[in-house]
Image (cartoon, coloured by chain):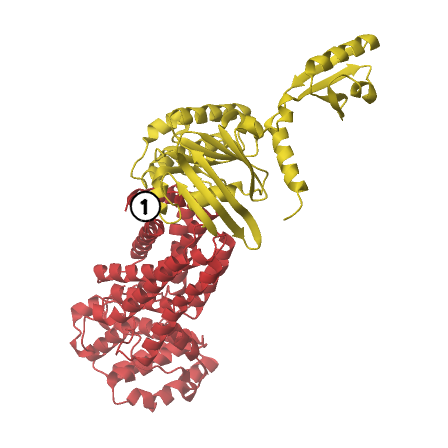
Amino acid sequence: MSAHISIVDLVKHYGPTRAVDGISLEVRRGEIFGLLGANGAGKTTTLECLTGLRRPDSGELRIAGHDPVREPRAACERVGAALQRSELPDRLTPREALGLFGSFFSRRAEPGRLLSRFKLTEHADAPYRALSGGQRQRLALALAFVNEPEVVLLDEPAAGLDPQAREELHALLLEVRAAGQTVLLSTHDLGEAEKLCDRVAVIHRGRLVATGTPADLRPAGARRTQWIRLRVQPDVHHDQLGRLAGVRSVQREGLGWVLESTEVPASMMALGALLVGMRAEVLELQTAAPTLLQAYLGLTQEVEERPAS
Amino acid sequence: MKGWWTHAVISLRLHFRNRLALVYGYVFPLLYLAVCWVIYRHESVPLARHCGEFLTIGILGGACFGLPTTLVSERERGLWRRYRLTPAPSWTLLTGTALVRYLVLLGAGLVQLVVARLTGVPWPVDPVGLLLAFTCAAFAFIGLGLVIAMLADNVTAVQALGQCVFLPMLVIGGVAVPLSALPEWAGQVSFFSPGRYSVEAIQSAITGTELSARAFAEIMLVVNGVAGVTAASLLFRWDVGEAGAGVRRGWAGLVMVSWLAIGWLALEGEFGFRPAPAEPVAARRFASWQKIGAADVARVDFDLPPDTGVVTPIAVEDDVPDGDLAEELQVMHSRLADWAPRRGPVPLQAVRNLLCVAAVSDVLQQPVERHVPAIILQTLRESYPKAQLIKMLTWIALHPEEGSVIRSLDDLGIPGEVGDETELRQRMRVYATKFVVRLTGRPH
């Protein structure tokens, strides 16, 4: 697949602060690509440079075949975006908003269809101030699609949404991908990235730490590691758990324990024998595979520990 | 032009949905009008000579507060960031917003004129000229409002910057305080203020002078408008934190340069331009007082304050003065016989001087004030034929701003001095009209 978004050595300063420090990455046509990072990592600045809202200090940008710095109008025609810090006038209705923003583009989606697609038909003529947070967010997303874009840039699209609205958003983004549109989204919700994104890039303090599929990013050793979460009555001792077969580490979590095991079946058998011997009552017992969260924490910790060059 | 029309239409629609904006846009200008009416209620047609003032205050308020407040609050909410994500150029948004503001100002001006008409102000003599003058003034102040919007980071800053422009222009810029009431230095300063040219252009169009008489004022307003719009486009920023915005603030100096340039042109008169003074209603009709006929006299506005009121009182026949009052009047009457100003070479000025005696007594609220007019009317009757006197009094009633006035009557035994010449001339006009009523037997 060809690159639909290309960023090469992007650098952006805010005064003395180097917000983006030489990021390079490519997003392929038709994929959902996630930018992961903590607040202030440089995700939003990267997106704002791609939309033309910020002028990079250096670096090359291409989006949907255009340079957003040198050809901003042409790039705008092919790109849709929903960024943070962007409200609409209190008395503007969703129908008017879609009509207004659509009128600026050569190619535009029919407002009625967008209202239906983003479940806003019932509120089409309600003033913006009367919309709930979720409805406002859906309207912001609808506005990103008002020009039938080839590429969609979304900055924390699920921020402020309730769980149901979040699920609806995820379903919508998967539909978008199925329709062949490219999505670049920023998020610090790693579960969301893991669920939606074909590939992710981890950004930390303005630098690109890693790029790949969520599975690729997990360290090789971690792919075999699982967590066992345990709570029993009466409680067991830390050392008893640490001696179990396959257990690499034991940590206290609330009233229970979390065991890190590289051989889960052996660890579970040993744990069962221990508990039967103690005549202990099992209150909670779960196993879980390591998530992108652990990968992310590992990667960023690695960068922190690296000596400054 | 893609989206320009839609943006303008929706902006206008949003304006009319905002009750607060309607109050500020339409009710506040009526308050200015009401204030002017209260101040000038004793003039023959209370607001006719002050339309330029209240219309200018309305434009200034709408353009220097309403417009930038709208733009800055939109930018604060991030609406402009969203516009930035579209192919729409900045001028699409600025011109659309400016057009909407112009229409709002025009609407507010029309409402003011209609309400003024209900109080007795005649329709403008030159409506097309008025539209032109109004448009020039709106253009100048909208340009200024755009610059304020580009300089201000938030709505609070708009209020601060707006006041910096609004208040000086009202007080020493020739907008709210008449130039005749200002000290000389302030009158000179007012030449640098677009407010002065706005008042003069609009008032001239309402009272019907030729375009050439107000062309200078209108050209100056257009110059200010071009400077404002140019500076605003150079200062434009989609977001408060936009890079380089601080450095570009210097472009606001363009507006100051345009103000200095128009002031210099007006004061130096290098190009032969001089702002035309506002003339009263119907001033153009007569070339001289000798040509005034009965039909013209009938057209004078005879809506006068009552003789028994505080302003321009005239004693009734059975109200005979006694004691010190009678003595004081006797002294004045005897001195009046040899009073030089009543025997000057120009009859019209001599009549004006005699009217000053009644007007000064009235303004200074002398105990003899209600008895003096009767003495003055008697003196006038003794001095001039009735027909000639009616013509001269009618002329003065229609042209109170002409000729010189006498502010102090010490030589007639009346102490004190009148400070406000405008007020004095208005009282003279009322007495002249009241005398015309008595001489013609016209009911009022």
Task: Examine the rendered structure and indicate whether residue A32 appears above or below residue A209.
Answer: above
Q: Residue A134: x and y, percent?
A: 49, 30
Chain for mark 1? B
- The amino acid type found where label 1 is placed reads Ala
- Chain B, which colour? red
Of B69 and A102, nearer the camera is: A102
Determine which quarter of the picture holds residue B340: bottom left
Across and down, in percent, residue A172 comes to: 44, 25
Q: Is residue B19 at least partly visible in the picture?
A: no
Drawn side of residue B253 relative to residue B197, left or right:
right
Which quadrant is the C terminus of chain B positioned in?
bottom left
Q: Secondary structure at mark 1?
A: helix
Marks counted in the figure total: 1
> To which quarter of the image does residue B322 belong?
bottom left
Tell me if residue A71 comes above or below residue B371 in the rendering.
Answer: above
Residue at image coords 49%, 46%: A9
Residue located at (64% from left, 33% from top) = A297
Q: Position of residue A252 (x, y in %)?
A: 76, 25
Task: Provide the residue designation for mark 1.
Answer: B8
- Return the residue nearer the eye: B110 or B433: B110
- Give the colour in which the image draws chain A: yellow
Q: Is residue B387 left or right of residue A48?
A: left
Q: Position of residue B441 (x, y in %)?
A: 23, 69
